[in-house]
Amino acid sequence: MAEATSDQPATLNLVDPSEEKIDTLLTTDQLENFGLKSPGKKGKHYVLDTNVLLHEPGCLNRFQDNHLCIPADVLSELDRFKTEQTERGSNARRVHRALTQIFGAEGQVTKGVRTDGGGTIRLVIYDPSLCERSSKELRRFHRIFPDRERVDHRILACTLLLAEHVDLPVILVTKDLNMQLKARAVGISCEDYLNDKVAPQDSAKREMARLAMDPNELQRFASSGEIALGEDRLADFHVNQYLLLEGGERQTIPARLTEGGRLVRLVVPEVLRIPDGNHLKPLNLGQKCFIDALLNPDISLVTCFGQAGTGKTLVAIAAGLHGIFAREHNGLTVSRPVVAMGEQMGYLPGSLEEKMRPWLQPIYDALELLMSPRSNQGPKRKRQKGEEDGRQQKPYDDLVNQGVIEVEALAYIRGRSIPNRFFILDEAQQLTPQEAKTVVTRMSKGSKLVMVGDPDQIDHPYVDSRSNGLVYTRQRMRGQRFAAHVTLNRGERSDLAEAGARLM
């Protein structure tokens, strides 16, 4: 090998000849027609992915004085969903109506239209046959991701092209974690949509707040059942918050803060009585606070965080049964999303009840446990009507047939008005904020909505522990006189289940 005669160190030429600069660039008219010309000299360019628009159609007005860019391929993807009779389909239609109103009947949508926040919104078009001629980065991108017909890849390529032709920062906004990784792999700045994300402390399953009190004050509270909280202390707490009052060594009493700034004693029966069934006794302080909120007629929304085995679903169903047998509500409705509320069940065989049975089996298990006779001794039960098919009569069947108890698919709640019912939404952490809003707005006078779940167990592809419908509802409704929140931290299912939830 010949020696290098230059004083400079020898280097390898890694430049691909096909990547040399091409003189055929886009003209000014082409830049404007493709949406690649910046409408302003300040702010940032945010490229919105389809899932952001489906997640919150109102996001178009939340970027203030920045420039929103919607790839034309996003419109094609929205078009696929607009006929669905689901929350996703409804959101796709809302986006189409909003864009039609923004752009109007005339004008070129790629030039940019002013938004209420002082920024702009426009469509950006990616045409590989023309745009790729001016971009070395795009040729590199398509070598890494060769599938040019995949919508995700076209949106990423559109973002790269935009970043090449504007001076302002370009940021892709998407809730798809895999797309975020692809974007970062090719040097695209990427962010999650954060408008509906709660603060980390609001999604955490924290212990009950503690309030130090003078022992004499605590004694007066224990005697009277209520005490006024000074104005200087109220700023740290909110209405219907549960507190553990401490007044000396091992002297603690739980209390709830009312709207008038008074602490009141919990109203919790020794057991929740289910006629001809199994009574349920609260096993820890968290469950007592939960029952206090569930039985309070002035509280119409209860949210509850709790890991597996803490009893959140069982206690909620027991309180609901207790309420309908006491004639406080006309019926009990229990539902849960099938991962996402918009999923269809049509591909499974059988009736709607048969399709939903595997997903709702934990609810049926809780009903059977609570409503089974306390003693199985006695004469053999006669065969009941409706058992000819071989299925054993369940203790809740009569109430289900009468419509007093409903166990139903959440996907079909849109358009309903639900009066005077005890409504339990299990696994509420699987909802998006918009889906949670749909459920909350279905509740009519006299109804109580109980949303339970574990923010750490998320199966939905576009929500996480800080952006799911359960934590979003809790954060938005906190401080309302009709809303209360409880966190269950102690598992009661078994020592094995408790250890598994903590350690695995």
Image (cartoon, rainbow, N blue to C red):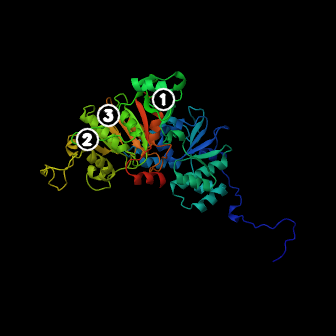
Sequence-first disc among 1 and 3: 1
User: Any mark on residue 405, and which?
Assistant: 2
Q: Can residue 127 be seen in the rendering of this structure?
A: no
Instruction: Report the residue marked by disc 3.
Output: 269
Residue at left 53%, top 60%? 147
Rendering coords of residue 93 (x, y %): 43, 41
Residue at 55% across, 41% down: 109
Q: Are marks 3 and 2 in contact (CB under 8 Å)?
A: no
Q: Nearer the viewer, residue 149 or 351?
A: 351
Q: Residues within 10 Å of mark 2 (few under 14, many from 20)?
A: many
Q: Is the residue marked by circle 1 packed among few (<14), some (14-19), or many (20+) residues within 10 Å?
A: some
Residue occupied by mark 1: 238
Three-letter code for the amino acid on which mark 1 is drawn: His
- Is residue 332 depicted above or below 296 in this figure? below
Q: Quadrant of residue 137?
A: bottom right
Taking the image as shown, residue 102 lies to the left or right of residue 368, namely right
Q: Above or below — where is 232 with respect to 397?
A: above
Compare marks 3 and 2 and give the one earlier in the sequence.
Answer: 3
1 vs 3, front mark? 3
Calculate the distance from the C-alpha at mark 2 to the C-alpha at mark 1.
34 Å
- Element class at badge 1: loop
Q: Work out whether 135 lies above or below 254.
A: below
Amino acid of disc 2: Ile
Return the x and y of residue 113 as percentages of the image width and height: 57, 36
Q: Residue furthest front?
A: 249
Q: Quick one: 375 or 200, which is closer to the camera?
A: 375
